[in-house]
Amino acid sequence: MTSRYEPYREMWRLFSRPIFLITDLLGVVGLTVSQFITGPWAGGLAAVGSAFLAIGFSLPVALFYQLQANAESLKILDTCNRAGIRAMFRSRQSDSVELREAIDSAAARSTDIKLMGVAFRSIFNPSGEHTRQFRERLDDPRILLRILLLNPESDAAKRRALVEKGNTTIEDIHFTINHGVFPASVLNLG
């Protein structure tokens, strides 16, 4: 269990790194010396001293938040890896080729295929763009195929259909359920 003071300790560790201490020291020296000299050098030293101080204080703070964001991202990626997620895709249009290649690859070397998405009509459409090998593997009874898709009666499906005007989201989900998945394997998640 981490202490509630741990973030403050981490911030202090960053501020006390030699590079930031030296940067702050150079900033203080530059500002101090600028007070004792006159002419254009005074303004230049004050500007440089101020810049060093700004960098010496703001960079550790930015680094602290970046490290926190990186840790959270790595935690998410690790969780995905442990859950067996091998790839994520944004949409059929933008990821069409990569999605098809990933599914073909999984179908070629696995006896257990798990898919999660909205509708998967393009996968279960017999006239879809699939390799023959993919279609054979998909229809092979020895392959355990698990699909998690959106309930066509859910509010989420209705909202998605509204957002994607002209889209046939709900029809596509029904198509997948009626033509691609054995009804016994459909889990209604509401």
Image: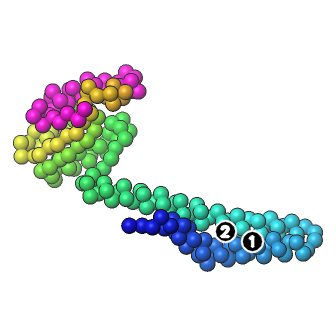
Proximity of marks 1 and 2: CB atoms separated by less than 8 Å: yes
**Quadrant in which residue 96 is drawn:** top left
| Front in this rendered view, residue 96 or 85 | 85
Question: How are the residues colored?
Answer: rainbow
Residue 38 percent location from the top left of the image: 93, 71
Q: Is residue 15 left or right of residue 123?
A: right
Is residue 106 in view? Answer: yes
The residue depicted at 76 percent of the width and 73 percent of the height is 28
Taking the magenta stretch, the answer to whether it contains residue 112 is: no
Q: Is residue 76 above or below residue 63?
A: above
Q: Earlier in the sequence, mark 1 or mark 2?
A: 1
Residue type at mark 2? Gly
Q: Which residue is mark 1?
A: 27
Which segment is the magenta one? 161-190
Residue 5 percent location from the top left of the image: 50, 67
Residue 54 percent location from the top left of the image: 70, 64
Residue 56 tag number: 2
Q: Is disc 2 surrounded by few (<14), some (14 to 19) or many (20+) residues within 10 Å?
A: many
Q: Is residue 63 left or right of residue 159?
A: right
Q: Is residue 173 above or below residue 136?
A: above
The residue depicted at 16 percent of the width and 53 percent of the height is 109
The residue depicted at 88 percent of the width and 69 percent of the height is 42
Residue farthest to the top? 166
Quadrant that contains the N terminus: bottom left
| Front in this rendered view, residue 147 or 110 | 147
| Front in this rendered view, residue 23 or 126 | 23
Residue 41 percent location from the top left of the image: 88, 70
The residue depicted at 29 percent of the width and 43 percent of the height is 99
Residue farthest to the front? 4
Q: Secondary structure at mark 2?
A: helix
